[in-house]
Amino acid sequence: MKTLKDAIYQITLPTPYAVGDVHLYLLKGDRLTLVDAGVKTDAAWSELVIQLKELGYSPGDIDQIVLTHHHPDHMGLIEHFPNLSTVAAHPKLKPWLEREEAFFLRYEEFFHRMYKESGVPEQYLGLLKSLRKPLKWSAEGTLTLELTEGDRIPGHEEWVTIETPGHAQSHISFYRQADGSFIGGDHLLAHISSNPLLEPPYGIEKDRPRPLLQYRASMEKLLDRNIQMVYPGHGKTFQNTDKLVIQRLKKQEERALKVLNMFEEESLCAYDVCRRLFPKHIESQFGLTMSETIGQLDYLENKKAVIAEFSGEQKYYYVNR
């Protein structure tokens, strides 16, 4: 096997989220780079300082941070590093990091429109006021380097960027062909399937993203590579990637069939489907369950298994017979 230039070290930090701890990865090559940056809490920062010290480093030694995606548990501590020269990520992470107010206004308006379109009752619309709450756990800063498909991590030329949207529009992963290593953020986890999450269009895009369709395409992209070891954002490192990818795709198809079987002779809006698909979780995890539901409907619509039509502001789906 080819001699590897970069060493990789896993750092594990606590989060306030149900998903539990999050993993960061320290790359030691021509530069000292941290892949992802935890969540902005005192507990996470204290633990990061301790684990860096165990590896022989301090926060002041970190020259570059590379982000897999914009979620707060992956970019929260950026502001704490005193000698950071580069913050690298996908271009779609920029409005989150740089706190672009115009983007957040569009973000809120998008969900207001989507929930109206989906038949969501008024009682849930108050949740839209809390869309910015997660920002308290996240960082504010400047994106200094954009990474897209095929780009190499500066100072770590063995690692190539793979765009893996679905869980987040900004999601990227990193692959080292020499030994089949894959730093995957939240794209592929051993113990759970990542939620494909609804997001508004970015920039000049007119149509909203279809995150479940993107997630499937991003998963299938992994089958084209000889991945030997996954370094994930949560949970254990693991192998046998192709088998897991195929299982995840099959499980999603099974859930889509379950959704299709709900229709019988009637038409349903997305909220109706969500209530039936997630009766125990719709109240406590409304945003996640609606994202999952609309994703399944996008999949069925793309397969031409269902057809969608508007009645006023509301979108209804019915079986394509």
Image (cartoon, rainbow, N blue to C red):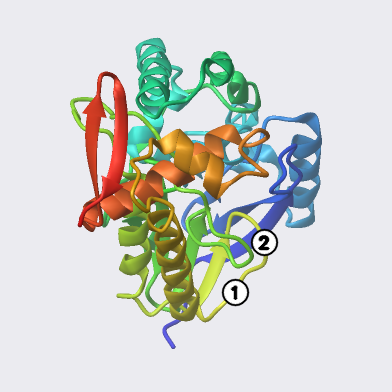
Nearer to us in this view, 161 or 223: 223
Mark 1 in CB contact with mark 2 (< 8 angstroms): yes
x, y percentage for residue 79? 60, 26
The residue at which mark 1 appears reads as 238
Above or below, 249 relative to 86: below
Q: Secondary structure at mark 2?
A: loop
Please give the name of the residue rendered at 50% of the width and 75% of the height, measured from the top-left corner.
244
- Residue 235 bears which disc, if any? 2
Above or below, 212 relative to 253: above
Image quarter where the N terminus lies is bottom left
Is residue 292 shown to the viewer in this render? yes
Residue at the extreme front of the image, as rendered: 265
Q: CA distance from mark 1 to mark 2?
A: 9 Å
x, y percentage for residue 287? 54, 33
Nearer to us in this view, 41 or 151: 41
Please give the name of the residue rendered at 40% of the width and 62% of the height, measured from the top-left corner.
257
x, y percentage for residue 204? 18, 25
Is residue 35 shown to the viewer in this render? no
Q: Quadrant of residue 111?
A: top left
Nearer to us in this view, 95 or 129: 129
Please give the name of the residue rendered at 58% of the width and 33% of the height, measured from the top-left corner.
286
Three-letter code, disc 1: Phe
